[in-house]
């Protein structure tokens, strides 16, 4: 059980590191961001698989399962890393929102050369 939780912590930390990499990537680089999001989903899928293994292990060995101090510590580290990932996700959304506002502002600004229109009758 401890090994599964260690594997989960390792996977969560990889996800956190990759999320930091996404945060430092410009939202304007659409192709790269798309591939990074797909890769990030694979990290999340691997964490979900580990969660299923942990659930199965604890279900079938519930009478033998004892939460040791090491397991508590690992679970706390996992929770802390997940909270950091949530905060990073919020920062990514802020950056995207900021970029969208900039684009919207640029699109709504009329060109100075088009201010006057000459009409002949």
Image: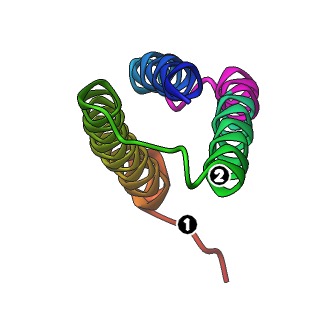
Query: Where is mark 1, residue-wise?
Result: 118
The residues bearing labels 1 and 2 have C-alpha atoms spaced at a distance of 74 Å
The x and y percentages for residue 103 are: 46, 48
Which is more toward the observer, 45 or 86?
45
Could you tell whether 52 is left or right of 100 in the image? right
Question: Which residues are the magenta region?
Answer: 27-39
Q: Earlier in the sequence, mark 1 or mark 2?
A: 2
Characterize the magenta stretch by its predominant secondary structure.
helix
Identify the mark at residue 44; answer none if there is no mark: none
Q: Is residue 6 above or below residue 34?
A: above
Could you tell whether 72 is left or right of 121 in the image? left
Query: Where is mark 2, residue-wise?
Result: 55
Picture quadrant of residue 74 = top left
Give the secondary structure at mark 1: loop
Q: Does residue 36 belong to the magenta stretch?
A: yes
The x and y percentages for residue 1 are: 56, 30
Q: Is residue 54 above or below residue 2?
A: below
Q: Does residue 32 belong to the magenta stretch?
A: yes
Give the secondary structure at mark 2: helix
The x and y percentages for residue 69 are: 23, 30
Which is more toward the observer, 11 or 68?
68
Q: Nearer the viewer, mark 1 or mark 2?
A: 2
Q: Quadrant of the C terminus?
A: bottom right
Which is more toward the observer, 2 or 80?
2
Picture quadrant of residue 13 = top left
- At x 40%, y 49%, the residue is 93
- At x 27%, y 36%, the residue is 72
């Amino acid at each position: 059980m401890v090994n599964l939780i260690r594997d989960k912590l390792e996977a969560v930390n990889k996800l956190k590191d990759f999320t930091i990499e996404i945060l430092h990537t410009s939202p304007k680089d659409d192709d790269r961001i798309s591939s990074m999001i797909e890769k990030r989903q694979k990290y999340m899928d691997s964490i979900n698989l580990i969660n299923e293994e942990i659930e199965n292990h604890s279900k079938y060995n519930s009478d033998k399962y004892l939460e040791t101090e090491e397991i508590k510590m690992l679970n706390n580290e996992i929770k802390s890393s997940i909270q950091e990932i949530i905060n990073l996700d919020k920062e990514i959304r802020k950056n995207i929102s900021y970029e969208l506002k900039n684009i919207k502002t640029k699109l709504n600004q009329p060109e100075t050369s088009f201010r006057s229109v000459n009409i002949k009758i």
